[in-house]
Amino acid sequence: MTVRLAGVAIFMIAALYTWYGRDYTASFGDVLGPSVFPVIVGIPAMILSASLVVFPIGQVQWPDPPHMLRQVAALAILLGYALLLRDLGFPLATFGLILGIGIVLGGAPLRALILAAIFAPALWALFDQILGLPLAFLGRWFD
């Protein structure tokens, strides 16, 4: 039953992804446009997830409570990152993401702190300065 529920959940996510991505436009890029990518990803995902509903194979073993708690914490950190990215700016939000995920995955807090301090500004510099993809250095809270 768990495999079928997962198939339904994945199908719904893929359908929403395809639906919302179909109208995406950009003033630059490929002739086909950026709306093709969600369709290329979403339709096979819907087909494969429907196959899980029709032909469930395998047995699911749920993780023990400590591992499940770590997974929930990682999802909460990722959701918090998505919600706070505009308000905090890319480097600060990414710092929190790297630090939080590093600790949740069992890394030493000091190492996670050092990696977050190095990689958050480095990723901003890579995307914003080198690749030319504009990312806010400071978010709305600092304006």
Image (cartoon, grey):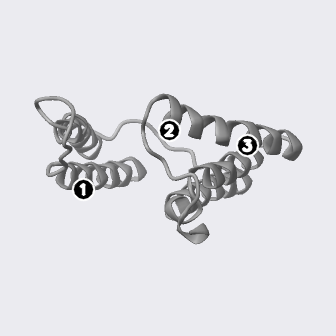
Task: Classify the position of the C terminus by image quarter.
Answer: bottom right
**CB atoms at circles 2 and 1 under 8 Å apart?**
no
* Residue at x-position 47% and y-position 40%: 59
Between marks 2 and 1 in the image, the one whose residue lies nearer the viewer: 2
Give the amino acid type for the residue marked by disc 3 in the picture. Ala
Numbered disc total: 3
Location of mark 3 (residue): 116
- The tag earlier along the polypeptide, 3 or 2, is 3
The x and y percentages for residue 62 are: 58, 49
Q: Which mark is residue 3?
A: none
Q: With respect to residue 132, does 101 lie above or below?
A: below
Distance of label 3 from label 2 (alpha carbons): 18 Å
The kind of residue on which mark 1 rests is Leu
Q: CA distance from mark 1 to mark 3?
A: 33 Å
Q: Nearer the viewer, residue 18 or 69?
A: 18
Given the image, on which type of amino acid does mark 2 rest?
A: Asp
Q: Is residue 23 left or right of residue 9?
A: left
Is there a contact, CB below 8 Å, between mark 3 and mark 2?
Answer: no
- SS state under label 2: helix
Q: Position of residue 93 (x, y in %)?
A: 61, 55
Instruction: Say few, some or many: other residues with alpha carbon within 10 Å of mark 1 (under 14 / 14 to 19 / 20 or more).
Output: some
Please determine whether, in this image, residue 92 is positioned above or below residue 126: below
Query: Pointer 2: what residue?
Result: 128
